[in-house]
Amino acid sequence: MKWTAAKLRALKGEQKISMLTAYDALTASLVDDAGIPAILVGDSLGMTVLGYETTLPVNMDEMLHHTKAVARGTQNAMVIADMPFMSYQPSLSMGLENAGRFLKEAHADAVKIEGGTIRVELIESLVKNGIPVLGHIGLTPQSVKEMGYKVQGKSSEQARQLMDDAMAIEQAGAFAVVLECVPPELGEMISGALSIPTIGIGAGAGCDGQVLVFTDMLGISNKPVPKFVKKYAHLNGIIAEALTAYKSEVEEGTYPGDEHTY
Ligand code: KIV
């Protein structure tokens, strides 16, 4: 079954939603084969696979390239493309045009944009034009220079603002909203107040779903990961062992053996 924005939205209150990032056809097919209903081509790919320090340098060409690959590797999951920094902030028309490219050229099913009340007009315009939108509030990494990487919504004023942002995103027509790095009580409160699903990342168990970065949850990177990440595997050790064994066997002349030779 191909997942759509409407089907994902209908899971609210019925079943918790799992979402993972993927950046290429191979990882997308692994996520898809596991039956995970939504794949986010996050601009986190800037750090996880492109070697940037933040998501800020990621551009449309890079996001389109990776989204195309993910779409090619996916059969059932919904593919959500993250709109990169400055691909939608300068104007509504730029946001509409760039969002349209993800569906038209890269075969994404939806786009994600960061920001709350400030994005209402853009979300309305995208949805009216047939582009499903996933909102993203709380810690928004494209605003790292302004907010840093820290938990959001700790003061009652900030919490109220985040609640207003979430309500505004729902009103504007988004099918779901990512809540990143907020206290669990606030995650639960916002989830209870909305009729669309909340997808938490560092926002506690009260959200309607969870999203994690593929490389973080598989322990592929040896960089430190945030507290909210559960490592379901420690692949970096396994990969390092395999690479070292290959190097030694090539150097010793034990690879290739007879069984690897025509
Ligand atoms: O870029 C990304 O991967 C994200 C998620 C972690 C929510 O925005």
Image (cartoon, rainbow, N blue to C red):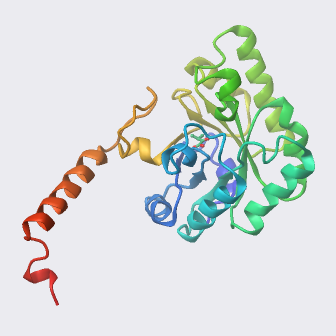
| Left-right relation of 31 to 140 | left
The image quadrant where one finds the N terminus is: bottom right
- Give the answer, above or below, for where 188 lies relative to 239: above
Quarter-of-image position of residue 209? top right
Of residues 64 and 246, the one nearer the viewer is 246
For ligand 1, give the image quadrant: top right
Q: At 80% from the left edge and 37% from the top edge, which residue is drawn?
A: 170
Is residue 216 shown left or right of residue 107? left
Q: Position of residue 198 (x, y in %)?
A: 65, 36
216 versus 37 height, above or below = above
> Where's residue 153, x and y in %?
66, 17
Report x, y in % for residue 65. 63, 63
Spot occupied by residue 77 in the image (x, y as percentages of width and height): 57, 61
Q: Tell me the residue at 53%/56% (across/down).
A: 23
Q: Is residue 59 above or below residue 108?
A: above
Q: Residue at x 55, y 67 (%)?
A: 74
Single out the residue that lies furthest toward the bottom: 262
